[in-house]
Image (spheres, rainbow, N blue to C red):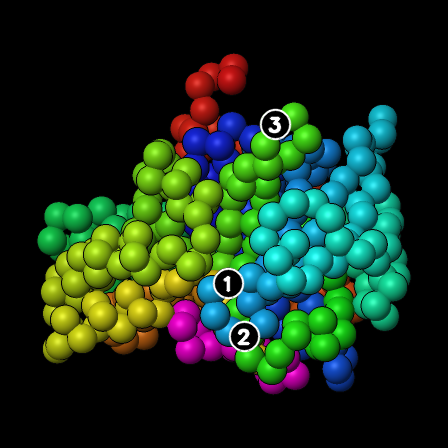
Amino acid sequence: MSHHFDSPTAIEDGRLNLGDLYVFPERPGTSTLLVTVNPDAGRSNPTTFRPDALYEFVIASDGGTREDLAFRMSFDEPDAAGNQRMRVRYAAGPSSRSGTEGAELGSGRTGQTFALGNGGSAWFGLAQDPFWGDAVALFAFTRGLAENQYRPELFAGTPGNLLAGRNVTAIAVQVPDAAFGGTSVTVWARISLYGHAAQRQVSRAAHPLLRSFFFPHPGPATEALNAGSPADDVAAYRDLVLRTALHVAEVSGAALPDDLAAAVAAAFLPDQLRYRPGQAAHFAPGTGNGRGLHDDAFGTTLSLMVGHPLGVTTSPHPVVADFPHLAPAGHDDIPALSDLLGLRERGG
């Protein structure tokens, strides 16, 4: 689901698995950037962040594919209780494209909101996974498509949510809109490893469900996607996305399958969220404005793929008025998702 367990690296270590990216207006003149990591944290994955990993919100202030701003989060080793210190830095210009440097904005501890020097705030910690979707129905639906069967009835009943009761770790920063450097920008998230060898990007995230439809099998293709940049997405992946989208359009009986497939490819690539600070968040690949925590990414994406409303639902999560707006972590006694999905060798 979304980017959950999307590559061999992500399956091996959830601390390197970006889940979902959100960007939405906060109080007037400010916005929140939020990313989830560690799907099924505390069961399938740890509840800490890797000290040798750099977690970033990346911005192209001209709305293109070339980053020129980045918020960089790094972490100390966890203490005996699993708590860490996070440092937030802000890089501008060419230095935002690689490296670990930047002007330090502030630091704080797990689960505590702390001030940033630019007038913003930051938080990180364990929370309920804000993504929702009927994964069981989606798996059956995509299997049907592979066999040239269109089965919209799979989404007609009471929707399930495979992620109910499951947690993630999350990073949230509330920043002045001026920090985006423009009035119409693009945003994505990434993780890179550093310190022991040359810096290496291992994960990136923007559009939810890009992997589920177009890169459903963790392997070399998803590792390459995670190591790449939006600047290369169209050249590298348009043909693959177009073929898959055309197949879905034809099987689902779309009136103009070629046109729908082209629209889908243009919506998903490059893999980044468009955002106009100060305007209401509304998730829609290619045409929306950022992504709010209660936007129905599952139904929106599925509807885009087939050309009409399908699988549309409302958020099962409560509205949390205060920053970082995430529901508290749950503690249900449920099996690890990695075990249910058979993602790891027993004992691995």
- Residue 52, located in which quarter of the rendered image? top right
Q: What amino acid is labelled 3 in the image?
A: Ala
Residue 124 location in percent, x, y?
75, 50
Q: Residue at x 44, y 58 (%)?
A: 230
On screen, residue 132 versus residue 256, left or right, reads right
Q: Foreground: 39 or 271?
A: 271
In this figure, which residue is indicated by the disc labeled 2?
Answer: 62
Q: Residue at x 47, y 77 (%)?
A: 288
In the picture, the disc for residue 197 is 3
CB of mark 2 within 8 Å of CB of mark 1?
A: yes
285 falls in the magenta region = yes
In the picture, the disc for residue 204 is none
Query: Is residue 257 shown above or below 98?
Result: below
| Disc 3 secondary structure class | loop
Q: Residue furthest front?
A: 94
On screen, residue 280 versus residue 306, left or right, reads right
| Disc 1 secondary structure class | loop
- Residue 258, located in which quarter of the rendered image? bottom left
Q: What amino acid is labelled 1 in the image?
A: Arg
Residue 73 location in percent, x, y?
72, 49
Crowding near pointer 2: few (<14 within 10 Å), some, many (20+)? some
- Segment colored magenta: 277-289
| Disc 2 secondary structure class | loop
In this figure, which residue is indicated by the disc labeled 1?
Answer: 66
Q: Residue at x 65, y 26 (%)?
A: 196
273 falls in the magenta region = no
